[in-house]
Image (cartoon, grey):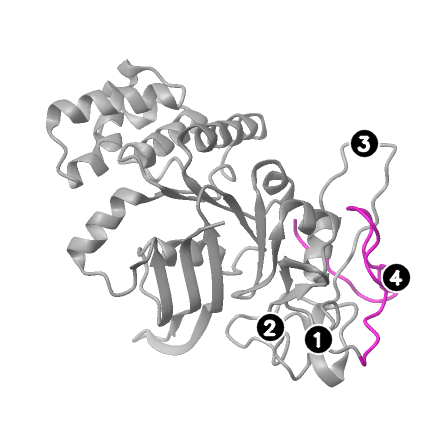
Amino acid sequence: MTALVEVRDLVKTFPVRSGVFAKASGSVRAVDGVSLDIHAGEVLGLVGESGCGKSTLGRLVLGLLAPDSGTIRFDGRDVVSANRRRLRELRRDMQIVFQDPYSSLDPRATVGDSVAEGLRAQGVPAGQRQDRVEEVLTLVGLEPYHARRYPHQFSGGQRQRVGIARALAVEPRFLVADEPVSALDVSIRSQILNLLRDLQARLDFTLVFVAHDLSVVEHLCDRVAVMYLGTIVEIGTRDEVFGNARHPYTQALLSAIPVPDPTRARSRVRLTGELPSPLDPPSGCRFHPRCPIARRAVCDVEVPTLLAVAAVPAHLASCHLRTGAHQDLDPGPGPGPGPGPFLPSPDPTTPTSSCPG
């Protein structure tokens, strides 16, 4: 498949300020050396625990944040060094759906004005803007007359439909949906997910779906990238990641997915220790303090790289033991077939913390 977006060695840090004068006392590496290709026409799921850097990565790709280092190319065009005029041109092709439908819309502007915001920025004449607003509101399941109403007159699900309409108004080729259903009621989430999937199939745009819920990602995405403390630890097709996960962190996330069948049991993988501070990440493999199969001789010292898993070049994982990078070490129990239990739970007398799904 053709790569629409190419990310190479991307780094983004944020200063941590403290004291009366708010002096920088440290920094957080929200994104640390990420390289990634996003294929044209696919739905890529970007998953991980809160604070792992997935939302920051999405905003970096869109040019909403400037990276400290690294390159981003969209359809061959450099995003990092683009000036204001070139960024405006890119905005027609790249849009975002924000997480919170309540704060992402201006309460003083009508829905029609909010949806037309991108069209105005692109210089579309007023008459054409009105027609396009009505067209895109209908596309997301609302009515044309809703353009005259204000955000407080809509439910959360309807507001998120407005947010999707605003993003699609300029007919983008690439869309980042930043946890678009996490603030919605469970009964509404499936409607928004089905809407996004239907729109992506009809309009053929590329979608990056940022989430922390793997069950949602399984329903929606073609490929899955798993992030941990600013790095990508595993990436592959949905079937490969869900059926043959190789990184212990991915296996732990999968084990936390609820099973709808009450007669079927799934063994939980419980990770020892707490999530390390992003202000002082561990040396070597960042996951090794919580990893059930870590080997101190290697995992504490060497930083793993994304390597192909077995004979599947499109399935990559960054684990010294699961990818055969150190074949002289015993990797411990291997994954079983399918999305069942992958790793044994630690001794019940060991203090543990559940891995959030």
Residue 218 part of the magenta segment: no
Which of discs 4 and 3 lies nearer the camera? The answer is 3
Residue 79 at x, y percent in the picture:
29, 59
Category of crowding for the residue at label 2, using alpha-carbon neighbours closer than 10 angstroms: few (below 14), some (14–19), many (at least 20): some
Magenta stretch, residue numbers: 328-357
What is the C-alpha distance between the residues marked 3 and 1? 38 Å
Q: Amino acid at mark 1?
A: Ala
Image disc number at residue 305? 2
Image disc number at residue 348? 4
Which of discs 3 and 2 lies nearer the camera? The answer is 2
What is the C-alpha distance between the residues marked 4 and 1? 31 Å
Residue 177 at x, y percent in the picture:
44, 42
What is the C-alpha distance between the residues marked 3 and 2? 37 Å
Magenta span main SS: loop
Give the residue number, with chain letter if any, for mark 3: 261
The residue tagged with tag 4: helix, strand or loop? loop
Residue 263 at x, y percent in the picture:
88, 32
Q: Is residue 307 left or right of residue 64?
A: right
Give the residue number, with chain letter if any, for mark 1: 325
336 is higher (above) or lower (below) than 93: below
